[in-house]
Image (cartoon, helix red, strand yellow):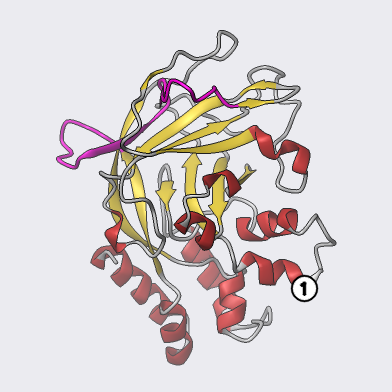
Amino acid sequence: MTHETADRLRQLAHTHLPEHTAERWIGLLRPSLRLHRHTAADPATVVGRLGGLPHLPKEEPWPVWEGHGPLAFIASLDCGLLPSADLDIALPADGTLAFFYFDGQLDDGCAVVDPGDPDGWAGARVLYIPAHVPVAERAAPREIRPYPEVRLTAHLETTAPEPQHPVVSRAFDSTPDDHPARHRDFESALWNFFEGTEHRIGGYATTVQGEVELEVARGALGSPAWDDPRIAEEALRWVLLAQFDTDDDADMMWGDCGVLYWLIRPEDLARHRFDRAMLTWQCG
């Protein structure tokens, strides 16, 4: 994990938590790749991009949500260029990931992609294109306005679970609300730790309104009542694949300054079953 963010998070934990609690919490930290806009001053390799037009195989149809229309192209990532060896998720060693989402252009946001509604799952798609498959730039359907292209670099960054995350409850034996790991000062310090636009691969999601793993888990279980104990258990089976933040440079706005989150089970990721990834999104 990156020394800078890991050291700062360790310091934060030791400042706000008892020693034993701090060490256990530090053991929950996970690496991620934070994606930044490429600039002339950045020597890092361009690993992907937001917006623009996708490069797809000739036989690959443009993703469509039946009854609603084509999805918008959000981002693509070159797995062969991502510095993913230090991550704890098994990204493909090569090939391209392309992310699509029904962004409301066609219906002014009336149809909502919601993990709790299986009819809406087709409103988000992740395509994996192996490196050996020929591709060409694909024009967007005429009713879709492509987003401006923003080239991306990737930098390793340590992430931390938020106090209500299921891994925290598991680590501290269900974690009552008065547990030090859930004190307001510690929660506020974590909230203020990461700044700026947060596009991210792997690690923990930076949420707007609660743990995204719980939202996806509930949807995967058929939307039982929120107090169903199976939801917390199922949430532990999902990891963040990617999050794409609101971004002025790419003219992307998800609701009110929201974020798109794609999650996947590790076993599906290992088998490159990106058709089983699920999307949820949050906004302020």
Going 56% across and 14% down the picture, which residue do you hit? 144
Going 48% across and 22% down the picture, which residue do you hit? 59
Q: Report the side of 177 relative to 95 (left or right).
A: right
Going 76% across and 22% down the picture, which residue do you hit? 67
* Residue span colored magenta: 37-63
Q: Quadrant of residue 283?
A: top right
| Residue at the bottom extreme of this rendering | 20
Residue 236: x %, y % from top left? 60, 69
Q: Main secondary structure of the magenta part?
A: loop
Quarter of the image with the C terminus in it: top right
Q: Is residue 50 magenta?
A: yes
Residue 231: x %, y % from top left? 73, 66
Q: Residues within 10 Å of mark 1 (few under 14, many from 20)?
A: few
- Amino acid type at circle 1 is Pro
Going 51% across and 72% down the picture, which residue do you hit? 186
Decide which of 30, 236 is in the foreground and name it.
236
Q: Which residue is mark 1?
A: 229
Residue 148: x %, y % from top left? 41, 20
Quarter of the image with the N terminus in it: bottom left
Q: Report the side of 63 relative to 271 (left or right).
A: right
Judge whether residue 89 can be spotted in this image.
yes
In the rendered view, would you say 35 is above or below 254?
Answer: below
Q: Is residue 168 magenta?
A: no
Judge whether residue 256 can be spotted in this image.
no
Decide which of 99, 11 is in the foreground and name it.
99
Q: Does dot 1 land on a helix, a strand or a loop?
A: helix
Residue 249: x %, y % from top left? 39, 27
